[in-house]
Image (tube, grey):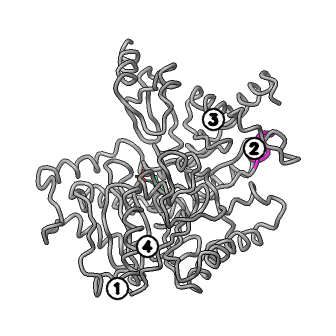
Amino acid sequence: MTITKDIQAIDSAHYMHPFTDHKSLAAKGARIITKAEGVYIWDSEGAKIFDAMSGLWCVNVGYGRKALVDTAAKQMLELPYYNSFFQTTNVPAVKLAEKIIKLAGDNYSHVFFSSSGSESNDTNLRMVRHYWTTLGQPERTVIISRNNAYHGSTVAGASLGGMGGMHAQGGLPIPGIVHIEQPYHYGLAPNEDRDAFGIRAASWLEDKILEVGADKVAAFIGEPVQGAGGVIIPPKTYWPEIQRICDKYGILLICDEVICGFGRLGKWFGSQLLGARPDLMTFAKGVTSGYIPLGGVVVGKRVADVLIDKGGEFNHGYTYSGHPVACAVALANIEILESEGLVDRVLHETGPYLAEKYAELAKHPLVGGAETCGLVAGFVLMKDKQNHIAFDEALEVGMICRGHCFANGLIMRAVGDRMIIAPPLVTTKAQIDEMIALIYKCLDATLLDLKTRGLL
Ligand SMILES: *Cc1c(COP(=O)(O)O)cnc(C)c1O
């Protein structure tokens, strides 16, 4: 087959990839993914790979869903596009907004649509500041976020996020955004009682509010479970305490549900599981299972009532806000999640099963801090876990492990030395067994490799 080499050459010559060092990519050539079905993808050399990352946390109903394809085709013929700017609307956008509000619950009344998670967080930033200005408190502008958070890659999204590497390029974060430490128990205080640590980690929000001045803080933003930061699952005490602190100072709570929303944690939204009542919820990814781009913000009544009653025109929106094809596909995707009972299955069956398997995996000599929540999971590769000694970052042990995963037919992502998965919500127990067997195989290969290289 020459298609691989040909496409790789053109890829290097013309395609600038996201989050990629092109010099090192060109040296080995990109892997060309050519087809997919269920939980598997195939590359141009015919290798079959278990996609334990659901693409990029999004293909929740699995690949090859004809119902989504047919819905898109039908909607494209009927009305491929129209905007919602000119006092106009369209049926799929209206029906999807109604459906999402039903899933979100009584606290919410409206949905603002975008095409991605990043755009939705830009919307959040402008919406919360417009909210406070409308209420006569324009000095409330500061948004508090967390280190290692991921809120997207636009200027506002990357600024809200807490990734040092992203802040280092392009003069970020923009003013008015500050960060506190993340609630990473295993990484920051493994010997402290987990629940006590959760309360202490939440107290950093209160410290920051007092430092900034409570009357200057507009909102706190956080992912229910931090995803791209390495699947950081907070202690169960954390979110209720964060909620209490937000309430105490009257500041808005934004939950970025781009990964956790639409069933990943076993509830329609992660905040419903973890004990928060956000005023705004960001969504994208799983809303369409990635078949077509769509994102948005679920707006709580507290904010919507003020903006609609007194806010006047919100001078903000996107050409593709409420795109009829994307909204129709989202409705069909939610229909699949409901009719196949996938969200409940994560809560009661596959989530607990994965948790059991990860508890066993924790005994592997390389594995520290193994944790799951619904169908996300992570662990960190440790040099000497008895004495809590990590590998030297410069060794990029996570990347070594990821290489062994790729070679053995498994997509598992490395965030530093944290190895993370987020398999499709359709993954069966038998497929979880298959995935876990692959993980053991890759860990053993990594262990052998590290010993051979003299790193252990
Ligand atoms: C992926 C992600 C985003 C950004 O979404 P895009 O569609 O890539 O813009 C924002 N927040 C979280 C939590 C994400 O995981």
Location of mark 2 (residue):
367
Circle 1: residue type: Val
Which of 65/192 is in front? 192
Location of mark 1 (residue):
306
Q: Is residue 372 left or right of residue 90?
A: right
Which of 234/211 is in front? 211
Looking at the rendered structure, which numbered label has been put on residue 438?
3
At numbered mark 2, what does the secondary structure look like: helix, strand or loop?
Answer: strand
Q: Is mark 4 within 8 Å of ligand 1?
A: no
Circle 3: residue type: Leu
Residue 318: image quadrant is: bottom left
Magenta segment's dominant SS is loop
At numbered mark 1, what does the secondary structure look like: helix, strand or loop?
Answer: helix
Which of 417/430 is in front? 417
Category of crowding for the residue at label 3, using alpha-carbon neighbours closer than 10 angstroms: few (below 14), some (14–19), many (at least 20): some
Circle 4: residue type: Leu
Q: Position of residue 11 (x, y in %)?
A: 37, 24
Location of mark 4 (residue):
280
Q: Of label 1 and label 2, which has the lower sequence position?
A: 1
At numbered mark 4, what does the secondary structure look like: helix, strand or loop?
Answer: strand
Magenta-tinted stretch:
361-368
User: Which mark's residue is nearer the viewer, 4 or 3?
Assistant: 4
Circle 2: residue type: Val
Quadrant holding ligand 1? bottom left
Which residue sits furthest top?
2
Q: Is residue 47 left or right of residue 99?
A: right
User: Which mark's residue is nearer the viewer, 4 or 1?
Assistant: 1
Q: Residue at x 54, y 37 (%)?
A: 411
